[in-house]
Image: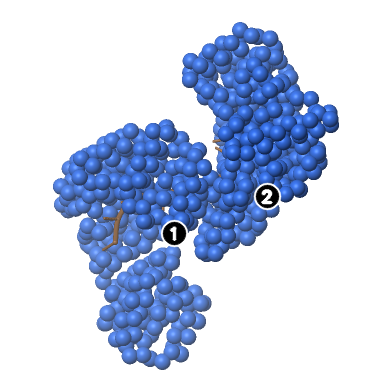
Chain colours: A blue, B brown
Amino acid sequence: MKSIGIPLHVSRQFSTACQKALLLPAATVPSEAASYSQVLDKWPDIRTLKKIHCRIILHLNLSSCISFGIKLMRAYAARGQTSITRQIFDRIPERNVVIFNVMIRSYVNNHLYHDALFMFKSMNSSNTNPDYYTFPCILKACSASMDLRVGLQVHTQVLKMNLDGNLYVGNGLIAMYGKCGSLTGARSVLDEMPRRDVVSWNSMVAGYAQNGGFNDALEVCREMQTFGLNPDAGTMASLLPAVTNTSSENVAFVEDMFMKVRRDELVPWNVMIAIYVNNSMPNKAVELYMEMEERRIEPDAITISSILPACGDLSAMMMGRRIHKYVERKRILPNLSVENALIDMHAKCGCLQEAKEVFDKMHFRDVVSWTSVISAYGKSGKGAKVVALFSEMQESITPDAIAFVSILSACSHAGLLEEGRHFYELMTKEYKIVPRLEHFACMIDLLGRAGRVREAYDFIKQMPLEPNETVWGAFLSACHVHKDMDIALEAADHLFQLAPKVSGYYVLLSNIYAKSGRWKEVASIRSIMKCRGIKKLPGISNVELNNQVHTFLAGGQSHPQSKEIYEELDALIGKMKDAGYVPETEDALHDVEDEDKENHLAVHSEKLAIVFAMINTKPGTLIRITKNLRVCRDCHIAAKLISKITERQIIIRDTNRFHHFENGFCSCGDYW
DNA sequence: CTAGGGTTAG
């Protein structure tokens, strides 16, 4: 008779549970044991688990305890209690391969890869041979910890034990080589396998995808089909890393795959949503999410974490709030990723209160939670709050490079020059974070917006990194705002040479050259843009009404209510002119050609969106707009006036920050 | 008892 015994370091709850178990009548042992066995296989919650554990030890004939030991180990591991799993393991006197496998798997499933590898080593030195269950698991530990060195050793052992023909072991090897970046290794394992299944091919797809080889990944998808295997949900999931910021052809390829796979399970939907989100197609993502709801496919935490950024992108506040209610109802919370995504969604919809509420209710916060809430306040220009939050964060969390980007840009939005400098010092000196281009760009922005154009210029000159287009772009905006033309032209020349990919910089350049009368350069920018195939990003604004996001294009006429909108806009502009409004044509190149400037100015997308919202909501209702470019001066002036004339608050989120218009004023203090 | 899907800045 072998006894499992109670682990020595049991918690107090455990002893209480034991006492309660003792009070229970001694049941007929065989049937009690059978029912416990069933319950254990269903991974009970920790309290039930401990009770059963006690009963097993105290009341049952323990002759079958090896199988109970295994079940207990698995159940504890499923609840994240690997140290109890380990205590049980330690008390089993004669360990066979299954027991080692369960222990290793417990570690791997709980992301304790080093413990798993260590356990594997002691397994080898205790004369227990690993089997074809051990290897896939230990290979996963190698993949997850990107340990190619150990992975290679494991492969050698696999070969020695003649297990390389096993399907699962082979699949594990492909995944291991792929994750560790050895695509040739992965490929040769795949080629040598006597038998391959979908997982084998999917692992190869994942390997290429994780290493940026989208075309190779696609090629493998086609190849598997020549072997008579069709892509499945797993293929789509494996492709995901390769399909971010990619061409529309590539997205279409996955869409096609999505149409062909079984769609009664969750994963294909989750992947397709994530792909839309990662390719700046939030409308499509939301559409798909709604289709899921119609088909009664239940979203999980992953669906939610993927769709929420899309809601944030679109400022789809009602949709976001509905999802928030859904996660509360379905008890998906607490879940760190979901909570973090909720904070960000509320913040991007301009609902600071709600964002803060989610943050306050969290039991565990990581650096992402803090970064999200800090940038939320930062984008609304609440500098003092940001500074307070940051110091609070430091008490429990070590800020990372991204956290500093958000605090630095928050200082910039709030015009907190000295604080920004302080945080930069803190980052480099205290936290020893080596500043990246993003940080330099923030600092340039900070200095530039505060009017320290010369200082910003000196800062660029002494940067240890080659300034990129973002840095010059930030600097150029500062010059543009503060009208420092000489230095602007030098910056413009630098930026010009960098062949920027963002069309906005060309527009900015063109405006600056035009302002200083350098028409030759203006013309040359035009032709260069044509040559490089760079099109001006059309200005669009989103507005949500009755659970639907309406999108307006600059000068757009396609909306069903178009006629009404333009009529109302005309009337409004009349009232604005009475109040002293003079259209500003200066920044007209922002998103239209210079001919016909004034005409087009009236129809920037945000104006259309504002009027649309005005027509369709009750007087006094707050209007929320999101646009894909920065607000131009003219629209900013117009929005201030409209807020006064119509007595409505208007919140416009542009690419940089929030503008909260109320009674003729904007929260940015005309500083943006 | 085999893979694969999630959140933060600009």
Question: Is A144 or A451 nearer to us in this picture?
Answer: A451
| Residue that protrudes farthest toward the right in the picture | A579
Q: Along the horizontal axis of the image, is A79 left or right of A507?
A: left
Label 2: which secondary element: helix
- Say which residue appears at 26% left-offset and 46% top-offset: A230
Q: Along the horizontal axis of the image, is A436 left or right of A302?
A: right
Q: Along the horizontal axis of the image, is A69 left or right of A650?
A: left
Q: Is residue A394 visible?
A: no
- Give the distance between the C-alpha atoms of the residues marked 1 and 2, in whole angstroms: 32 Å
Disc 2 residue type?
Leu
Q: Residues within 10 Å of mark 2 (few under 14, many from 20)?
A: some
| Labels in figure, total | 2
Q: Nearer the viewer, mark 1 or mark 2?
A: 1
Q: Return the x and y of residue A503 as percentages of the image width and height.
A: 56, 24
Image quadrant where one finds the C terminus of chain A:
top right
- Say which residue appears at 59% left-offset and 23% top-offset: A505
Q: Return the x and y of residue A413 as percentages of the image width and height.
A: 70, 36
Q: Is residue A253 visible?
A: yes
Find disc 2 in the rendering and name its residue.
Answer: A352
Residue A357, image quadrant: bottom right
| Residue that protrudes farthest toward the top in the picture | A520
Question: Is A665 or A152 nearer to us in this picture?
Answer: A665
Residue A7, image quadrant: bottom left
Find disc 1 in the rendering and name its residue.
Answer: A296
Q: Earlier in the sequence, mark 1 or mark 2?
A: 1
| Chain under numbered label 1 | A
- Say which residue appears at 64% left-offset and 17% top-offset: A594
Q: Return the x and y of residue A227 as percentages of the image width and height.
A: 19, 43
Q: Residues within 10 Å of mark 1 (few under 14, many from 20)?
A: few
Image quadrant where one finds the N terminus of chain A:
bottom left
Q: Return the x and y of residue A465 as percentages of the image width and height.
A: 55, 25
Discs 1, 2 touching: Cβ within 8 Å = no
